[in-house]
Image: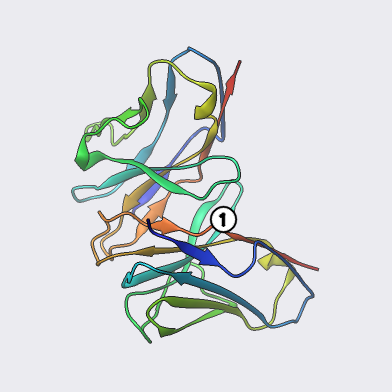
Amino acid sequence: AQRVTQPEKLLSVFKGAPVELKCNYSYSGSPELFWYVQYSRQRLQLLLRHISRESIKGFTADLNKGETSFHLKKPFAQEEDSAMYYCALSAPNYQLIWGAGTKLIIKP
Amino acid sequence: DVKVTQSSRYLVKRTGEKVFLECVQDMDHENMFWYRQDPGLGLRLIYFSYDVKMKEKGDIPEGYSVSREKKERFSLILESASTNQTSMYLCASRTGTSSYNEQFFGPGTRLTVL
């Protein structure tokens, strides 16, 4: 069965420290993976998708098929990165399977 | 700029009431979705629609129904609200059928059922 696991409900790091938000998936085919972000009092929005191989707001995510992971990373955290982050996997019926989310808090 | 709007930001209803949540998008998107967002559970798909008058059940359709009479509007109906339906409800829209395409979300409706 398809599944997305975000093992950390809460991650707290100091400003300037590296950030890694973990995402593991279970999928038998070739996965399409995404990171969505929800800042406080804002709507949920797409941050990045693995197929684009892009860096958005300093964040990158690499698909590791061997470890079935799609961790989100940023070398130097900023206070404005504090938000709720969701990892999502596309399902065969063209819908998204969502992880439970990780709340990221950047301490000053 | 894609705009997805939801009729209410906050709603308080009583057990047994019929509840209507409305969602409107202005970008002519074919696909529309209703999710529940609960802490520790992430987003769970209730229903989605890929065209006018078309609907498909998601993962948790029990206790809900939907209506899509016009392309821009997707309504979620709680036939008889119960306390376990207290949640944040998110509407989203997307162009085309490819899951690669971005889903655009509304601001959410926080529903409390007393």
Residue A48 coordinates in the image, percent (x, y): 32, 40
Residue at 64 percent across and 83 percent down: it is: B79
Q: Quadrant of the N terminus of chain B?
A: bottom left
Split into 4 quadrants, where in the image is the C terminus of chain B? bottom right
| Residue A79, quarter of the rendered image | top right
* SS at badge 1: strand
The quarter holding residue B112 reads bottom right
Q: How is the image coloured?
A: rainbow
Q: Chain of mark 1?
A: B
The correct choice, above or below, for B33 with respect to A57 in the image is below
Which residue: 41% across, 76% down? Answer: B72
Q: Quadrant of residue A106?
A: top right
The residue carrying mark 1 is B37
Q: Where's residue B56, x and y in %?
A: 39, 77
Three-letter code for the amino acid on which mark 1 is drawn: Gln
The answer to which of B79 and B91 lies nearer the viewer is: B91
Residue at 51%, 68% in the rendered image: B60
Image coordinates of residue A31 in percent, x first then y, are: 23, 47
Q: Is residue A90 left or right of residue B21?
A: left
For the point 60% across and 77% down, the residue is: B63
Q: How many marks?
A: 1
Structural crowding at the residue carrying mark 1, measured as other residues with C-alpha within 10 Å and reported as few (<14), some (14–19) or many (≥20): some
> Along the line of sight, which residue is nearer the eye, B8 or B19?
B8
Residue A35 vertical placement versus A21 (above, below): below
Image location of residue A13, percent across then percent down: 55, 18
Residue sticking out furthest to the front:
B1
